[in-house]
Image (spheres, rainbow, N blue to C red):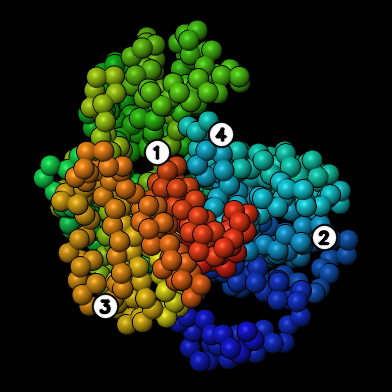
């Protein structure tokens, strides 16, 4: 296919003329540079800022060697939800502004044959699941950790790893790259830095440190009140009213909150609608909404009573005077037992059982203990007398936002955002517990109540052109983004075929958005739908049926759609649904395509590289 034969979705004639003319005039190196820049422009949208006029105007032109003696810089990121991408864009933009020759690459599209020619590499990568790389970066990891990876004695590198310390394999993806690059002979610019979910300050410090190592003045300058460096935002944003984002969320009003599941269901799933009126927030189908929940008042009260502390006590939180009650309700994680709190409480209590859990060789026991205990359980089982409020919060991690796939399109519901939320409820140590955000919606999400929210862009889960077929696979709340997909396609009058494969527990009580899907089928917006209700077992010995079984049952049609250019989407549970669906797709391709297991995996890998196989899993 030539440049003139392909026109991207949504481009005007004038836009296409500019792009095709530019592309035809560039050589391969210049095209590579421009592709990296455009990736940065797209990722900068996650922060509602524009890199134009800051990151590029001061950078050397493509093909320019830059300052004498300067080593070319590559910023490489692997991202599942956009955090690594946003940090990489910030770093790359300011490095370019200061005159460094650089390129910015998503691991998903990075040409691994370039690796042997790199000079300085800055890598930002998150960890997904149990120590795995983000799915879009899987191919990059496979190459780097494989036998074909080249020796890299001329390469210098530094790794910033993002993760969640409550998982056993904390920041493991970053650790794997750090180890492997060393094995390949590359030299560290700086030791790896591991960041927990409250990564802002550590990431900002890493950028400063790397800047100094590269021989530049600090890229990020002085610290701002929110913990990120003031220069970490492009200059164009500093004189404007800050956009709503993770550090400055919008207070959205709840305008609808209803149960989707029917009477007698074994679970509760809710449909939530929030007003974004006057926020200026915009999103695309596939994006997520970051929700900043509050901790349950009953839990806050219980902790205060157990420790004999008063809610009115004033404490210092990053230089700001805050009451302890407000801090425990809105600022800190007081449910999940983190390694930070475990270490802190082991020191305060002197309990041998806790001290043993903090040892380096007790990772498995530590993880098991954390899964079976919350902060309140440790406070009760290992009491500390006379603790003051400031010492308490010293061991607590900041309360992190929860991300939910957006279940609506702005084309259909302007100034609104819809969510599909499964309420997490369970019993632990004889007490009923609930998820922080889902419990907030279910128990305190009354109409007109407000919640701080922001949009989290997800460029790795995007609709293709209107005429491209879709295969959408999801279970439970994993159906949410497909509701947005179909609303968007209906509004645009898209003609591409669409096929939904949906799974839940019971047809009668758990068929989420059933009436809407039936209407879409009737109107021809949704071409086909297959369902799997795992607990509808009319025959006693019948095995449970899940979405992966439906894929295999319809193998011939699934493969035909793939061969005709269909894009495949998977949304739902990362630990079970995602690998099971992947195996089912590989089996379908192997059987119907007459391919061996390795060739079928290569087929799927090519789909991923071409952005035709996208996953939004959690």
User: Are dots 2 and 1 in contact, CB under 8 Å?
Assistant: no
Q: Position of residue 311 (x, y in %)?
A: 27, 26
Question: For mark 2, what is the residue?
Answer: 117
Indicate left or right for 404 with 340 as reference.
Answer: left
**Element at badge 4?**
loop
User: Are dots 3 and 2 in contact, CB under 8 Å?
Assistant: no
The nearer-to-camera label among 2 and 1 is 2
How far is mark 3 from mark 1, CA to CA? Answer: 44 Å
Give the mark, 3 or 2, whose residue is nearer the N terminus. 2
Instruction: Characterize the local packing of mark 1: few (<14), some (14-19) or many (20 or more) Cα atoms within 10 angstroms.
Output: many
Give the mark, 3 or 4, whose residue is nearer the N terminus. 4
**Element at badge 2?**
helix
Residue 263, image quadrant: top left
The nearer-to-camera label among 3 and 1 is 3
Q: With respect to residue 410, does 302 lie above or below?
A: above
Question: For mark 4, what is the residue?
Answer: 169
Give the mark, 4 or 2, whose residue is nearer the N terminus. 2
Q: Could you tell me which residue is drawn at 23 percent across and 27 percent down? A: 432
Give the mark, 3 or 1, whose residue is nearer the N terminus. 1
User: Are dots 3 and 1 in contact, CB under 8 Å?
Assistant: no
Q: Position of residue 248 (x, y in %)?
A: 40, 53
Numbered badge on residue 399: 1
Indicate left or right for 177 with 452 as reference.
Answer: right
How far is mark 1 from mark 4, CA to CA? Answer: 21 Å
Numbered badge on residue 524: 3
User: Are dots 1 and 4 in contact, CB under 8 Å?
Assistant: no
Q: Could you tell me which residue is drawn at 38 percent across and 17 percent down? A: 378
**Element at badge 3?**
loop
How far is mark 3 from mark 4, CA to CA? Answer: 46 Å
How far is mark 3 from mark 2, CA to CA? Answer: 51 Å
**Element at badge 1?**
loop
Q: Position of residue 116 (x, y in %)?
A: 81, 57
């Amino acid at each position: 296919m030539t440049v003139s034969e392909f026109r991207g979705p949504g481009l005007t004639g004038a836009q296409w003329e500019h792009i095709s003319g530019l592309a035809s005039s560039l050589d391969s190196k210049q095209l590579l540079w421009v592709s990296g820049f455009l990736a940065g422009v797209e990722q900068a949208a996650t922060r509602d800022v524009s890199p134009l006029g800051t990151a590029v105007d001061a950078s050397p032109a493509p093909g320019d060697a830059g300052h004498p003696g300067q080593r070319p810089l590559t910023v490489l990121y692997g991202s599942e939800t956009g955090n690594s991408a946003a940090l990489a864009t910030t770093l790359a933009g300011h490095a370019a502004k200061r005159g460094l020759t650089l390129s910015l690459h998503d691991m998903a599209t990075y040409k691994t044959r370039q690796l042997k020619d790199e000079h300085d590499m800055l890598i930002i990568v998150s960890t997904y699941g149990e120590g795995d790389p983000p799915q879009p970066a899987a191919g990059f990891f496979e190459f780097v950790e494989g036998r074909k990876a080249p020796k890299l004695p001329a390469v210098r590198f530094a790794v910033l790893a993002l993760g969640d310390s409550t998982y056993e394999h904390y920041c493991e993806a970053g650790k794997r790259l750090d180890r492997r690059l060393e094995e390949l002979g590359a030299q560290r610019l700086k030791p790896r830095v591991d960041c927990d979910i409250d990564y802002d300050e550590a990431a900002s410090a890493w950028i400063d440190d790397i800047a100094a190592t590269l021989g530049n003045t600090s890229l990020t300058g002085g610290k701002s009140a929110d913990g990120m460096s003031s220069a970490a935002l492009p200059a164009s944003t500093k004189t404007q009213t800050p956009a709503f984002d993770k550090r400055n969320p919008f207070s959205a009003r709840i305008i609808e909150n209803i149960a989707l599941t029917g009477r007698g269901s074994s679970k509760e799933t809710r449909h939530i609608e929030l007003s974004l009126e006057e926020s200026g927030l915009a999103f695309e189908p596939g994006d997520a909404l970051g929700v900043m929940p509050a901790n349950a008042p009953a839990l806050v009260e219980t902790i205060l009573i157990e420790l004999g502390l008063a809610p009115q006590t004033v404490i210092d939180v990053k230089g700001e005077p805050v009451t302890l009650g407000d801090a425990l309700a809105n600022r800190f994680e007081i449910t999940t037992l983190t390694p930070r709190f475990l270490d802190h409480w082991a020191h305060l209590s002197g309990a041998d059982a806790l001290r043993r859990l903090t040892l380096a060789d007790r990772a498995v026991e530590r993880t098991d203990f954390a899964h079976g205990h919350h902060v309140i359980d440790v406070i009760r089982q290992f009491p500390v007398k006379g603790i003051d409020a400031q010492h308490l919060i010293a061991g607590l991690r900041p309360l992190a936002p929860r991300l939910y796939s957006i279940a609506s399109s702005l084309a259909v519901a302007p100034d609104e955002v819809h969510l599909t939320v499964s309420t997490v409820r369970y019993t632990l140590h004889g007490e009923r517990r609930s998820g922080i955000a889902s419990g907030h919606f279910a128990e305190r999400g009354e109409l007109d109540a407000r919640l701080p929210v922001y949009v989290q862009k997800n460029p790795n889960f995007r609709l293709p052109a209107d005429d491209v077929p879709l295969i959408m696979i999801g279970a439970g709340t994993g159906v949410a983004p497909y509701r947005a997909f179909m609303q968007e396609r209906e509004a645009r009058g898209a003609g591409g075929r669409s096929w939904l494969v949906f799974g839940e527990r019971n047809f009668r009580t758990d068929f989420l958005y059933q009436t809407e899907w039936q209407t879409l089928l009737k109107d021809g917006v949704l071409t086909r739908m297959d369902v799997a209700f795992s607990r509808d077992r009319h025959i006693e010995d019948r095995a449970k049926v899940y979405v992966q079984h439906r894929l295999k049952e319809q193998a011939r049609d699934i493969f035909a759609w793939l061969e005709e250019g269909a894009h495949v989407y998977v949304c739902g549970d990362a630990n079970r649904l995602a690998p099971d669906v992947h195996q089912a797709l590989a089996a379908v391709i192997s059987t119907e395509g007459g391919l061996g297991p390795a060739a079928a995996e290569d087929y799927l890998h090519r789909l991923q590289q071409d952005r035709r196989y996208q996953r939004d899993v959690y």
